Image (tube, rainbow, N blue to C red):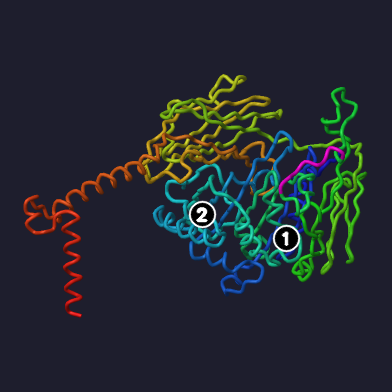
Protein backbone atom coordinates (compact mmCIF):
# COMPACT_ATOMS: atom_id res chain seq x y z
CA UNK A 1 0.00 0.00 0.00
CA UNK A 2 0.94 3.62 -0.30
CA UNK A 3 1.62 6.52 2.03
CA UNK A 4 1.36 10.20 1.16
CA UNK A 5 2.83 13.49 2.28
CA UNK A 6 0.60 15.54 4.59
CA UNK A 7 -1.11 18.40 2.85
CA UNK A 8 0.35 20.85 5.35
CA UNK A 9 3.92 20.08 4.27
CA UNK A 10 2.93 20.16 0.62
CA UNK A 11 1.41 23.65 0.88
CA UNK A 12 4.56 24.99 2.54
CA UNK A 13 6.71 23.32 -0.12
CA UNK A 14 4.70 24.84 -2.96
CA UNK A 15 4.84 28.29 -1.40
CA UNK A 16 8.64 28.16 -1.18
CA UNK A 17 9.03 27.00 -4.78
CA UNK A 18 6.74 29.50 -6.43
CA UNK A 19 7.75 32.60 -4.48
CA UNK A 20 10.48 33.54 -6.95
CA UNK A 21 8.57 32.87 -10.18
CA UNK A 22 6.01 34.92 -12.06
CA UNK A 23 4.47 31.73 -13.37
CA UNK A 24 4.56 28.32 -11.76
CA UNK A 25 2.62 25.12 -12.25
CA UNK A 26 2.59 21.79 -10.47
CA UNK A 27 0.75 18.48 -10.58
CA UNK A 28 0.52 16.29 -7.49
CA UNK A 29 -0.59 12.65 -7.83
CA UNK A 30 -1.73 10.96 -4.64
CA UNK A 31 -2.98 7.32 -4.66
CA UNK A 32 -6.18 6.77 -2.70
CA UNK A 33 -7.91 3.60 -1.45
CA UNK A 34 -10.08 1.42 -3.69
CA UNK A 35 -7.83 1.88 -6.76
CA UNK A 36 -8.43 5.61 -7.08
CA UNK A 37 -6.02 8.46 -7.70
CA UNK A 38 -6.17 12.13 -6.74
CA UNK A 39 -4.69 14.48 -9.34
CA UNK A 40 -4.23 18.07 -8.11
CA UNK A 41 -3.29 20.62 -10.78
CA UNK A 42 -2.10 24.02 -9.60
CA UNK A 43 -1.23 27.05 -11.76
CA UNK A 44 -0.05 30.31 -10.22
CA UNK A 45 0.78 33.51 -12.11
CA UNK A 46 1.76 36.96 -10.84
CA UNK A 47 1.54 40.30 -12.62
CA UNK A 48 2.84 43.50 -11.07
CA UNK A 49 0.38 46.30 -10.40
CA UNK A 50 2.46 48.65 -12.55
CA UNK A 51 2.20 46.34 -15.57
CA UNK A 52 -1.56 46.02 -15.12
CA UNK A 53 -2.00 49.79 -14.89
CA UNK A 54 -0.04 50.11 -18.15
CA UNK A 55 -2.19 47.38 -19.74
CA UNK A 56 0.92 45.23 -20.19
CA UNK A 57 -0.29 41.66 -19.66
CA UNK A 58 1.99 38.67 -20.06
CA UNK A 59 1.12 36.10 -17.43
CA UNK A 60 -2.21 37.44 -16.18
CA UNK A 61 -5.12 37.14 -18.68
CA UNK A 62 -6.18 40.52 -20.01
CA UNK A 63 -9.85 39.60 -20.29
CA UNK A 64 -10.04 38.64 -16.62
CA UNK A 65 -8.16 41.73 -15.41
CA UNK A 66 -10.45 44.06 -17.33
CA UNK A 67 -13.54 42.44 -15.81
CA UNK A 68 -12.14 42.85 -12.30
CA UNK A 69 -11.23 46.48 -12.96
CA UNK A 70 -14.62 47.33 -14.45
CA UNK A 71 -16.49 45.71 -11.52
CA UNK A 72 -14.10 47.20 -8.89
CA UNK A 73 -13.37 43.69 -7.59
CA UNK A 74 -10.33 43.44 -5.32
CA UNK A 75 -10.46 39.71 -4.60
CA UNK A 76 -12.41 36.89 -6.23
CA UNK A 77 -12.95 33.17 -5.69
CA UNK A 78 -14.82 31.07 -8.26
CA UNK A 79 -15.59 27.34 -8.04
CA UNK A 80 -16.97 24.77 -10.51
CA UNK A 81 -17.61 21.41 -8.79
CA UNK A 82 -19.14 18.05 -9.67
CA UNK A 83 -19.46 15.03 -7.41
CA UNK A 84 -18.82 14.50 -3.71
CA UNK A 85 -15.58 14.09 -1.78
CA UNK A 86 -15.75 10.80 0.13
CA UNK A 87 -14.02 11.88 3.33
CA UNK A 88 -14.62 8.50 4.99
CA UNK A 89 -12.50 6.71 2.37
CA UNK A 90 -10.23 9.42 0.97
CA UNK A 91 -9.38 11.33 4.13
CA UNK A 92 -8.46 15.01 4.29
CA UNK A 93 -9.57 17.22 1.43
CA UNK A 94 -6.93 18.65 -0.92
CA UNK A 95 -5.85 22.19 0.06
CA UNK A 96 -7.81 21.65 3.32
CA UNK A 97 -11.00 22.25 1.34
CA UNK A 98 -10.02 25.87 0.57
CA UNK A 99 -10.10 25.21 -3.20
CA UNK A 100 -13.29 23.18 -3.09
CA UNK A 101 -16.74 24.52 -3.83
CA UNK A 102 -20.27 23.31 -3.48
CA UNK A 103 -21.92 21.27 -6.20
CA UNK A 104 -22.49 23.47 -9.24
CA UNK A 105 -21.02 26.98 -9.26
CA UNK A 106 -20.02 29.03 -6.23
CA UNK A 107 -18.64 32.57 -6.25
CA UNK A 108 -17.65 35.07 -3.58
CA UNK A 109 -15.77 38.34 -3.99
CA UNK A 110 -14.73 41.50 -2.19
CA UNK A 111 -15.98 44.56 -4.09
CA UNK A 112 -15.03 48.14 -3.37
CA UNK A 113 -18.05 50.44 -3.12
CA UNK A 114 -19.41 53.32 -1.05
CA UNK A 115 -22.60 51.55 0.03
CA UNK A 116 -24.42 48.24 -0.27
CA UNK A 117 -26.52 49.35 -3.25
CA UNK A 118 -23.45 50.29 -5.27
CA UNK A 119 -21.70 47.07 -4.25
CA UNK A 120 -24.66 44.97 -5.41
CA UNK A 121 -24.80 46.84 -8.72
CA UNK A 122 -21.12 46.07 -9.32
CA UNK A 123 -21.73 42.49 -8.20
CA UNK A 124 -24.31 42.09 -10.97
CA UNK A 125 -21.80 43.51 -13.45
CA UNK A 126 -19.24 40.97 -12.25
CA UNK A 127 -21.48 37.90 -12.48
CA UNK A 128 -22.78 38.87 -15.92
CA UNK A 129 -19.25 39.37 -17.24
CA UNK A 130 -18.02 36.08 -15.77
CA UNK A 131 -21.05 34.35 -17.24
CA UNK A 132 -19.92 35.26 -20.72
CA UNK A 133 -16.25 34.54 -20.03
CA UNK A 134 -16.79 31.01 -18.66
CA UNK A 135 -19.89 30.07 -20.72
CA UNK A 136 -21.82 29.50 -17.48
CA UNK A 137 -25.17 30.67 -16.09
CA UNK A 138 -23.63 33.00 -13.52
CA UNK A 139 -25.98 35.73 -14.69
CA UNK A 140 -28.74 33.90 -12.79
CA UNK A 141 -27.09 34.87 -9.50
CA UNK A 142 -29.45 37.66 -8.53
CA UNK A 143 -30.58 39.13 -5.22
CA UNK A 144 -32.43 35.95 -4.25
CA UNK A 145 -29.22 33.90 -4.54
CA UNK A 146 -26.83 36.41 -2.94
CA UNK A 147 -25.87 36.72 0.73
CA UNK A 148 -23.32 38.77 2.64
CA UNK A 149 -21.42 36.44 5.02
CA UNK A 150 -20.05 37.95 8.20
CA UNK A 151 -18.04 35.08 9.75
CA UNK A 152 -17.49 32.41 7.09
CA UNK A 153 -14.86 34.00 4.83
CA UNK A 154 -11.75 36.12 5.33
CA UNK A 155 -9.79 37.80 2.53
CA UNK A 156 -6.64 35.99 1.44
CA UNK A 157 -4.98 39.00 -0.18
CA UNK A 158 -3.26 42.09 1.15
CA UNK A 159 -5.84 44.90 1.08
CA UNK A 160 -3.79 47.63 2.71
CA UNK A 161 -4.77 50.34 0.21
CA UNK A 162 -8.40 49.35 -0.17
CA UNK A 163 -11.32 50.61 1.84
CA UNK A 164 -15.07 50.06 1.88
CA UNK A 165 -14.82 46.42 0.82
CA UNK A 166 -18.08 44.48 0.61
CA UNK A 167 -18.18 40.67 0.63
CA UNK A 168 -20.89 39.05 -1.50
CA UNK A 169 -21.48 35.34 -1.97
CA UNK A 170 -23.68 33.46 -4.43
CA UNK A 171 -24.08 29.95 -5.79
CA UNK A 172 -25.97 27.93 -8.39
CA UNK A 173 -26.33 24.34 -7.15
CA UNK A 174 -28.31 23.29 -10.25
CA UNK A 175 -25.60 24.43 -12.69
CA UNK A 176 -24.25 21.60 -14.85
CA UNK A 177 -20.46 21.88 -15.19
CA UNK A 178 -19.20 20.53 -18.50
CA UNK A 179 -16.56 20.88 -21.22
CA UNK A 180 -17.70 24.34 -22.28
CA UNK A 181 -16.55 25.59 -18.85
CA UNK A 182 -13.18 23.81 -19.09
CA UNK A 183 -12.24 25.42 -22.43
CA UNK A 184 -12.38 29.04 -21.11
CA UNK A 185 -10.57 27.86 -17.98
CA UNK A 186 -7.65 26.58 -20.08
CA UNK A 187 -7.56 29.72 -22.22
CA UNK A 188 -6.71 31.76 -19.11
CA UNK A 189 -3.44 29.84 -18.72
CA UNK A 190 -0.27 31.18 -20.39
CA UNK A 191 0.32 27.89 -22.28
CA UNK A 192 -3.45 27.37 -22.82
CA UNK A 193 -3.32 23.59 -22.49
CA UNK A 194 -0.79 23.16 -25.32
CA UNK A 195 2.22 22.42 -23.07
CA UNK A 196 2.94 21.78 -19.43
CA UNK A 197 0.76 19.84 -17.05
CA UNK A 198 -2.36 21.51 -18.48
CA UNK A 199 -1.89 19.39 -21.62
CA UNK A 200 -3.24 16.44 -19.59
CA UNK A 201 -6.60 18.13 -18.96
CA UNK A 202 -9.14 16.47 -21.20
CA UNK A 203 -12.87 16.99 -20.83
CA UNK A 204 -13.68 13.32 -21.38
CA UNK A 205 -11.47 12.27 -18.46
CA UNK A 206 -12.10 15.25 -16.18
CA UNK A 207 -15.88 15.01 -16.19
CA UNK A 208 -15.80 11.22 -16.01
CA UNK A 209 -14.04 11.43 -12.65
CA UNK A 210 -15.73 10.51 -9.37
CA UNK A 211 -15.09 14.01 -8.04
CA UNK A 212 -13.73 17.14 -9.68
CA UNK A 213 -13.52 20.82 -8.89
CA UNK A 214 -12.08 23.76 -10.82
CA UNK A 215 -11.08 26.85 -8.85
CA UNK A 216 -10.06 30.37 -9.86
CA UNK A 217 -8.66 32.65 -7.15
CA UNK A 218 -7.49 36.24 -7.67
CA UNK A 219 -6.01 38.29 -4.85
CA UNK A 220 -3.52 41.15 -4.38
CA UNK A 221 -0.15 40.20 -2.92
CA UNK A 222 2.29 42.75 -1.47
CA UNK A 223 5.95 42.27 -0.60
CA UNK A 224 6.78 43.48 2.89
CA UNK A 225 10.41 44.12 1.93
CA UNK A 226 10.16 46.44 -1.09
CA UNK A 227 6.49 47.37 -0.71
CA UNK A 228 5.66 46.30 -4.27
CA UNK A 229 2.29 44.72 -4.99
CA UNK A 230 1.13 42.34 -7.66
CA UNK A 231 -2.08 40.65 -8.71
CA UNK A 232 -1.88 36.93 -8.20
CA UNK A 233 -4.11 34.44 -9.99
CA UNK A 234 -4.23 30.82 -8.91
CA UNK A 235 -6.08 28.17 -10.89
CA UNK A 236 -6.59 24.70 -9.47
CA UNK A 237 -8.11 21.48 -10.74
CA UNK A 238 -8.64 18.55 -8.37
CA UNK A 239 -10.01 15.29 -9.66
CA UNK A 240 -10.38 11.76 -8.29
CA UNK A 241 -9.92 9.17 -11.02
CA UNK A 242 -11.03 5.57 -10.92
CA UNK A 243 -7.96 3.82 -12.34
CA UNK A 244 -9.83 0.91 -13.94
CA UNK A 245 -12.48 3.18 -15.42
CA UNK A 246 -9.97 5.74 -16.71
CA UNK A 247 -7.93 3.06 -18.48
CA UNK A 248 -10.95 2.20 -20.62
CA UNK A 249 -10.09 2.85 -24.31
CA UNK A 250 -11.77 5.68 -26.17
CA UNK A 251 -13.50 3.31 -28.59
CA UNK A 252 -15.44 1.89 -25.61
CA UNK A 253 -17.18 4.98 -24.16
CA UNK A 254 -19.89 2.91 -22.47
CA UNK A 255 -18.53 0.42 -19.93
CA UNK A 256 -19.27 -3.11 -21.08
CA UNK A 257 -18.69 -6.27 -19.12
CA UNK A 258 -15.79 -8.39 -20.31
CA UNK A 259 -16.36 -12.00 -21.31
CA UNK A 260 -16.24 -14.22 -18.26
CA UNK A 261 -13.18 -15.97 -19.65
CA UNK A 262 -11.21 -12.70 -19.46
CA UNK A 263 -12.19 -11.88 -15.87
CA UNK A 264 -9.95 -13.04 -13.04
CA UNK A 265 -12.24 -14.79 -10.58
CA UNK A 266 -11.71 -16.01 -7.06
CA UNK A 267 -12.17 -19.76 -7.54
CA UNK A 268 -11.66 -20.45 -3.85
CA UNK A 269 -15.20 -19.36 -3.06
CA UNK A 270 -17.61 -22.25 -2.46
CA UNK A 271 -20.23 -20.63 -4.67
CA UNK A 272 -17.90 -20.27 -7.68
CA UNK A 273 -19.43 -21.70 -10.87
CA UNK A 274 -19.13 -21.45 -14.63
CA UNK A 275 -21.76 -18.72 -14.87
CA UNK A 276 -20.73 -16.75 -11.76
CA UNK A 277 -17.57 -14.89 -10.82
CA UNK A 278 -16.45 -13.38 -7.54
CA UNK A 279 -13.82 -10.62 -8.04
CA UNK A 280 -10.31 -11.63 -7.16
CA UNK A 281 -8.57 -9.35 -4.67
CA UNK A 282 -4.90 -9.43 -5.61
CA UNK A 283 -3.92 -7.14 -2.71
CA UNK A 284 -1.62 -5.24 -5.05
CA UNK A 285 -1.54 -1.72 -6.41
CA UNK A 286 -2.88 -1.65 -9.98
CA UNK A 287 -0.63 -0.77 -12.87
CA UNK A 288 -1.19 2.53 -14.66
CA UNK A 289 0.51 5.28 -16.61
CA UNK A 290 -0.33 8.90 -17.35
CA UNK A 291 -1.18 8.23 -20.99
CA UNK A 292 -3.81 5.67 -19.99
CA UNK A 293 -5.35 7.71 -17.19
CA UNK A 294 -5.63 11.03 -19.04
CA UNK A 295 -5.94 9.71 -22.57
CA UNK A 296 -3.02 11.79 -23.85
CA UNK A 297 0.69 12.28 -23.11
CA UNK A 298 2.13 15.15 -21.10
CA UNK A 299 3.55 17.62 -23.65
CA UNK A 300 6.68 18.53 -21.68
CA UNK A 301 7.14 21.65 -19.57
CA UNK A 302 5.55 25.02 -20.28
CA UNK A 303 8.32 27.21 -21.83
CA UNK A 304 7.35 30.16 -19.64
CA UNK A 305 8.55 28.36 -16.53
CA UNK A 306 11.97 28.01 -18.16
CA UNK A 307 12.07 31.68 -19.16
CA UNK A 308 11.60 32.69 -15.53
CA UNK A 309 14.49 30.45 -14.48
CA UNK A 310 12.21 28.15 -12.52
CA UNK A 311 14.34 25.19 -11.46
CA UNK A 312 11.54 23.54 -9.53
CA UNK A 313 9.77 20.32 -10.42
CA UNK A 314 6.39 20.40 -12.13
CA UNK A 315 5.14 16.87 -11.44
CA UNK A 316 5.14 15.09 -8.08
CA UNK A 317 3.79 11.72 -7.03
CA UNK A 318 3.21 10.69 -3.45
CA UNK A 319 4.47 7.11 -3.05
CA UNK A 320 6.57 5.14 -0.54
CA UNK A 321 10.21 4.48 -1.38
CA UNK A 322 9.55 0.85 -2.35
CA UNK A 323 7.16 1.83 -5.19
CA UNK A 324 8.70 1.23 -8.59
CA UNK A 325 8.27 4.09 -11.08
CA UNK A 326 9.47 4.18 -14.67
CA UNK A 327 9.84 7.31 -16.82
CA UNK A 328 9.29 7.34 -20.59
CA UNK A 329 10.62 10.43 -22.36
CA UNK A 330 13.12 11.44 -25.03
CA UNK A 331 14.07 14.69 -23.29
CA UNK A 332 16.20 15.52 -20.30
CA UNK A 333 14.51 15.32 -16.92
CA UNK A 334 15.55 15.19 -13.28
CA UNK A 335 14.12 13.44 -10.22
CA UNK A 336 14.15 14.70 -6.65
CA UNK A 337 12.92 13.06 -3.46
CA UNK A 338 11.75 14.90 -0.38
CA UNK A 339 9.98 14.23 2.90
CA UNK A 340 11.43 10.83 3.76
CA UNK A 341 11.35 9.78 0.09
CA UNK A 342 7.55 9.70 0.06
CA UNK A 343 7.31 12.53 -2.47
CA UNK A 344 9.06 12.12 -5.81
CA UNK A 345 9.17 15.18 -8.03
CA UNK A 346 10.22 15.45 -11.67
CA UNK A 347 11.46 18.40 -13.67
CA UNK A 348 9.80 18.04 -17.07
CA UNK A 349 11.71 18.32 -20.35
CA UNK A 350 10.81 21.07 -22.82
CA UNK A 351 9.45 20.02 -26.20
CA UNK A 352 9.31 16.29 -25.42
CA UNK A 353 6.51 14.02 -24.20
CA UNK A 354 6.75 12.78 -20.64
CA UNK A 355 5.04 9.71 -19.20
CA UNK A 356 5.11 7.96 -15.82
CA UNK A 357 4.63 4.20 -15.75
CA UNK A 358 3.77 2.39 -12.52
CA UNK A 359 3.74 -1.41 -12.90
CA UNK A 360 1.56 -3.66 -10.79
CA UNK A 361 3.27 -4.13 -7.44
CA UNK A 362 2.46 -5.55 -4.04
CA UNK A 363 3.12 -3.00 -1.30
CA UNK A 364 4.11 -3.74 2.26
CA UNK A 365 3.67 -0.21 3.58
CA UNK A 366 0.21 0.54 4.90
CA UNK A 367 -1.78 3.50 3.61
CA UNK A 368 -1.66 6.50 5.93
CA UNK A 369 -4.50 9.00 5.52
CA UNK A 370 -4.81 12.40 7.11
CA UNK A 371 -8.10 12.35 8.98
CA UNK A 372 -10.43 15.33 8.54
CA UNK A 373 -11.22 17.39 11.58
CA UNK A 374 -14.95 17.16 10.97
CA UNK A 375 -17.41 15.00 9.05
CA UNK A 376 -20.69 16.59 7.96
CA UNK A 377 -23.91 15.37 6.37
CA UNK A 378 -27.21 17.16 5.75
CA UNK A 379 -30.65 15.89 4.72
CA UNK A 380 -34.29 16.92 4.39
CA UNK A 381 -36.81 15.21 6.67
CA UNK A 382 -40.57 15.15 6.84
CA UNK A 383 -43.29 14.56 4.29
CA UNK A 384 -46.06 16.51 2.66
CA UNK A 385 -46.17 19.59 0.47
CA UNK A 386 -46.40 22.23 3.18
CA UNK A 387 -43.66 21.78 5.81
CA UNK A 388 -40.42 19.93 6.40
CA UNK A 389 -37.24 19.95 8.44
CA UNK A 390 -33.50 19.96 7.85
CA UNK A 391 -31.05 17.87 9.85
CA UNK A 392 -27.27 18.38 9.79
CA UNK A 393 -25.08 15.78 11.50
CA UNK A 394 -21.54 17.01 12.27
CA UNK A 395 -19.09 14.55 13.79
CA UNK A 396 -15.78 15.37 15.44
CA UNK A 397 -13.43 12.32 15.41
CA UNK A 398 -10.44 14.17 16.85
CA UNK A 399 -9.26 14.42 20.46
CA UNK A 400 -9.69 18.20 20.59
CA UNK A 401 -12.74 20.42 20.65
CA UNK A 402 -13.39 22.12 17.30
CA UNK A 403 -14.82 25.59 16.84
CA UNK A 404 -16.44 26.26 13.48
CA UNK A 405 -18.84 28.51 11.57
CA UNK A 406 -21.88 26.99 9.88
CA UNK A 407 -23.30 28.97 6.91
CA UNK A 408 -26.72 28.29 5.38
CA UNK A 409 -27.86 30.17 2.27
CA UNK A 410 -31.41 29.06 1.54
CA UNK A 411 -33.73 30.09 -1.31
CA UNK A 412 -36.61 32.41 -0.49
CA UNK A 413 -39.26 29.73 -0.99
CA UNK A 414 -37.70 27.67 1.83
CA UNK A 415 -38.61 29.61 4.97
CA UNK A 416 -37.05 28.28 8.20
CA UNK A 417 -38.55 28.82 11.64
CA UNK A 418 -35.71 30.15 13.77
CA UNK A 419 -37.50 29.29 17.02
CA UNK A 420 -37.30 25.58 16.05
CA UNK A 421 -33.50 25.67 15.71
CA UNK A 422 -31.95 23.02 17.94
CA UNK A 423 -28.29 22.07 18.36
CA UNK A 424 -27.76 18.98 20.47
CA UNK A 425 -24.57 17.24 21.66
CA UNK A 426 -24.83 14.23 23.95
CA UNK A 427 -21.65 14.96 25.89
CA UNK A 428 -22.39 18.68 26.31
CA UNK A 429 -24.95 20.12 28.69
CA UNK A 430 -24.67 23.75 27.57
CA UNK A 431 -25.76 25.13 24.22
CA UNK A 432 -23.02 24.58 21.59
CA UNK A 433 -24.18 27.65 19.63
CA UNK A 434 -22.07 30.63 20.68
CA UNK A 435 -23.14 33.24 18.12
CA UNK A 436 -25.98 33.54 15.63
CA UNK A 437 -26.49 35.76 12.63
CA UNK A 438 -29.87 35.50 10.93
CA UNK A 439 -31.36 37.50 8.09
CA UNK A 440 -34.85 36.32 7.12
CA UNK A 441 -35.99 35.92 3.55
CA UNK A 442 -38.27 38.29 1.67
CA UNK A 443 -40.46 36.75 -1.00
CA UNK A 444 -38.87 37.07 -4.45
CA UNK A 445 -36.34 39.61 -3.17
CA UNK A 446 -33.74 37.78 -1.08
CA UNK A 447 -33.06 34.39 0.46
CA UNK A 448 -32.44 33.29 4.03
CA UNK A 449 -28.99 33.92 5.50
CA UNK A 450 -28.08 31.93 8.61
CA UNK A 451 -24.64 31.76 10.24
CA UNK A 452 -23.85 29.94 13.46
CA UNK A 453 -20.59 29.85 15.40
CA UNK A 454 -20.50 26.60 17.34
CA UNK A 455 -18.15 24.41 19.37
CA UNK A 456 -18.25 20.62 19.26
CA UNK A 457 -16.36 18.65 21.94
CA UNK A 458 -13.84 15.96 21.15
CA UNK A 459 -15.14 12.61 19.89
CA UNK A 460 -18.72 13.93 19.77
CA UNK A 461 -21.54 14.30 17.31
CA UNK A 462 -23.57 17.48 16.93
CA UNK A 463 -27.09 17.30 15.48
CA UNK A 464 -28.53 20.57 14.16
CA UNK A 465 -32.21 20.66 13.19
CA UNK A 466 -34.78 23.26 12.24
CA UNK A 467 -38.23 23.28 10.63
CA UNK A 468 -39.18 25.20 7.53
CA UNK A 469 -42.23 26.04 5.44
CA UNK A 470 -42.55 25.66 1.68
CA UNK A 471 -43.87 28.59 -0.29
CA UNK A 472 -46.27 28.43 -3.23
CA UNK A 473 -44.65 29.56 -6.47
CA UNK A 474 -46.25 31.31 -9.38
CA UNK A 475 -46.91 29.39 -12.55
CA UNK A 476 -44.10 31.15 -14.42
CA UNK A 477 -41.52 30.50 -11.65
CA UNK A 478 -41.35 26.76 -12.21
CA UNK A 479 -38.47 25.38 -14.29
CA UNK A 480 -39.08 22.96 -17.16
CA UNK A 481 -38.17 20.00 -14.89
CA UNK A 482 -40.41 21.12 -12.02
CA UNK A 483 -41.22 17.58 -10.89
CA UNK A 484 -37.50 16.90 -10.30
CA UNK A 485 -37.45 19.32 -7.37
CA UNK A 486 -35.56 22.46 -6.42
CA UNK A 487 -31.91 22.56 -5.36
CA UNK A 488 -30.88 24.18 -2.09
CA UNK A 489 -27.17 25.14 -1.88
CA UNK A 490 -24.84 23.10 0.34
CA UNK A 491 -23.90 24.38 3.76
CA UNK A 492 -20.40 25.83 4.19
CA UNK A 493 -18.42 24.91 7.30
CA UNK A 494 -15.32 26.89 8.21
CA UNK A 495 -13.10 25.51 10.97
CA UNK A 496 -11.77 28.24 13.28
CA UNK A 497 -9.74 26.20 15.78
CA UNK A 498 -7.59 24.22 15.96
CA UNK A 499 -6.27 25.98 12.85
CA UNK A 500 -3.73 23.82 11.00
CA UNK A 501 -3.32 25.73 7.74
CA UNK A 502 -0.11 27.75 7.30
CA UNK A 503 -1.65 30.36 4.97
CA UNK A 504 -4.73 32.54 4.81
CA UNK A 505 -6.79 30.05 2.83
CA UNK A 506 -8.54 28.53 5.82
CA UNK A 507 -10.02 25.07 6.38
CA UNK A 508 -13.42 24.38 4.83
CA UNK A 509 -15.82 21.57 4.09
CA UNK A 510 -19.18 21.56 2.37
CA UNK A 511 -22.18 19.34 2.71
CA UNK A 512 -24.14 17.94 -0.19
CA UNK A 513 -26.95 20.10 -1.63
CA UNK A 514 -30.60 19.45 -0.86
CA UNK A 515 -33.28 18.45 -3.32
CA UNK A 516 -36.49 20.08 -2.15
CA UNK A 517 -39.88 18.94 -3.52
CA UNK A 518 -42.39 21.79 -3.73
CA UNK A 519 -46.13 21.79 -4.45
CA UNK A 520 -46.24 21.40 -8.22
CA UNK A 521 -49.35 22.06 -10.30
CA UNK A 522 -50.52 19.77 -13.07
CA UNK A 523 -48.87 21.39 -16.08
CA UNK A 524 -51.11 19.41 -18.46
CA UNK A 525 -54.15 21.41 -17.33
CA UNK A 526 -53.24 24.58 -19.25
CA UNK A 527 -53.04 22.47 -22.40
CA UNK A 528 -56.45 20.95 -21.69
CA UNK A 529 -57.93 24.38 -20.98
CA UNK A 530 -56.51 25.79 -24.19
CA UNK A 531 -57.88 22.89 -26.27
CA UNK A 532 -61.33 23.07 -24.64
CA UNK A 533 -61.51 26.84 -24.98
CA UNK A 534 -60.46 26.69 -28.63
CA UNK A 535 -63.10 24.05 -29.36
CA UNK A 536 -65.85 26.09 -27.70
CA UNK A 537 -64.76 29.24 -29.54
CA UNK A 538 -64.68 27.41 -32.88
CA UNK A 539 -68.17 26.00 -32.41
CA UNK A 540 -69.58 29.30 -31.22
CA UNK A 541 -67.95 31.34 -33.97
CA UNK A 542 -69.02 28.87 -36.68
CA UNK A 543 -72.68 28.95 -35.63
CA UNK A 544 -72.78 32.74 -35.32
CA UNK A 545 -71.03 33.16 -38.69
CA UNK A 546 -73.59 30.87 -40.37
CA UNK A 547 -76.45 32.84 -38.84
CA UNK A 548 -75.05 36.13 -40.08
CA UNK A 549 -74.01 35.11 -43.60
CA UNK A 550 -76.36 32.31 -44.71
CA UNK A 551 -79.54 33.33 -46.59
CA UNK A 552 -82.79 31.63 -45.49
CA UNK A 553 -85.70 31.24 -47.93
CA UNK A 554 -88.98 29.37 -47.77
CA UNK A 555 -89.63 26.07 -49.56
CA UNK A 556 -92.32 27.57 -51.79
CA UNK A 557 -89.92 30.32 -52.86
CA UNK A 558 -87.41 27.73 -54.06
CA UNK A 559 -89.88 26.13 -56.51
CA UNK A 560 -90.89 29.50 -57.91
CA UNK A 561 -87.28 30.42 -58.62
CA UNK A 562 -86.77 27.21 -60.56
CA UNK A 563 -83.90 26.10 -58.40
CA UNK A 564 -85.48 23.27 -56.47
CA UNK A 565 -83.55 20.08 -56.03
CA UNK A 566 -81.31 18.29 -58.50
CA UNK A 567 -83.76 18.85 -61.32
CA UNK A 568 -83.50 22.62 -60.97
CA UNK A 569 -79.69 22.50 -60.84
CA UNK A 570 -79.51 20.42 -64.04
CA UNK A 571 -81.98 22.71 -65.77
CA UNK A 572 -79.88 25.76 -64.93
CA UNK A 573 -76.69 24.15 -66.26
CA UNK A 574 -78.44 23.11 -69.53
CA UNK A 575 -79.70 26.63 -69.97
CA UNK A 576 -76.20 28.06 -69.62
CA UNK A 577 -74.86 25.49 -72.09
CA UNK A 578 -77.52 26.37 -74.71
CA UNK A 579 -76.72 30.03 -74.31
CA UNK A 580 -73.05 29.37 -74.98
CA UNK A 581 -73.80 27.24 -78.08
CA UNK A 582 -76.21 29.85 -79.45
CA UNK A 583 -73.54 32.56 -79.27
CA UNK A 584 -71.08 30.30 -81.03
Classify residue 499 by image quadrant.
top right
**Residue range of the region highlighted in magenta in the rendering:** 254-261
Is residue 222 in view?
yes
Q: Which residue is mark 1?
A: 198
Vertical arrangement, residue 260 with respect to residue 133, above or below: above
Q: Earlier in the sequence, mark 2 or mark 1?
A: 2
Give the image location of residue 262, x and y in percent. 86, 41
Vertical arrangement, residue 273 with respect to residue 372, above or below: above
Position of the C terminus, as image quadrant, is bottom left
Image position of 209 (left or right of 78): right
Give the image location of residue 50, x and y in percent. 60, 71
Give the image location of residue 471, x and y in percent. 39, 35
Classify residue 181 by image quadrant.
bottom right
| Front of the two marks 2 and 1 | 2
Foreground of the two, 133 or 517: 517
Foreground of the two, 451 or 315: 315
Vertical arrangement, residue 513 with respect to residue 383, above or below: below
**259 magenta-colored:** yes
Image position of 528 (left or right of 14): left
Give the image location of residue 58, x and y in percent. 66, 71
Q: Secondary structure at mark 1?
A: helix
Position of the N terminus, as image quadrant, is top right
In the current view of this chain or complex, which residue is farthest to the bottom?
584
Q: Secondary structure at mark 2?
A: loop
Crowd rating for badge 2 (residues with CA inside 10 Å; few <14, some 14–19, many 20+):
some
Crowd rating for badge 1 (residues with CA inside 10 Å; few <14, some 14–19, many 20+):
many
Q: CA distance from mark 2 to mark 1?
A: 25 Å
Foreground of the two, 223 or 429: 429
Q: Which residue is mark 2?
A: 137
For the stretch drawn in magenta, the main secondary structure is loop
The structure residue drawn at horizontal position 64% and vertical position 57%, both measured from the top left corner, is 182
**418 magenta-colored:** no
Amino acid sequence: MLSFLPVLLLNAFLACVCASSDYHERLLLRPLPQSTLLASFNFRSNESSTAIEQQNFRYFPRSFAQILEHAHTKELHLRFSVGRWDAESWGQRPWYGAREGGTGVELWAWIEAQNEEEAFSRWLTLVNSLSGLFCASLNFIDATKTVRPVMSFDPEGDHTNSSNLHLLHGNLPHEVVCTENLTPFLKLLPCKGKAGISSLLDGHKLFDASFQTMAVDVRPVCDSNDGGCSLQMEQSVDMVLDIARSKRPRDNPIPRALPIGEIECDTSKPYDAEDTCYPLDKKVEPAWKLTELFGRPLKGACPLTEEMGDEGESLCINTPPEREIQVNTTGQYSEARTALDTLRCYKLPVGADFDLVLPEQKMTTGLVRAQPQLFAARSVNGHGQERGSVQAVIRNPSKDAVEFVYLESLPWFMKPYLHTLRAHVDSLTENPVKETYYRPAVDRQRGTHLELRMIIPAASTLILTYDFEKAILRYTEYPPDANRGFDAPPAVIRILSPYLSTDKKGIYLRTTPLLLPLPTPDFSMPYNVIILTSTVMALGFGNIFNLLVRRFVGMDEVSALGAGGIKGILAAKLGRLKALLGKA
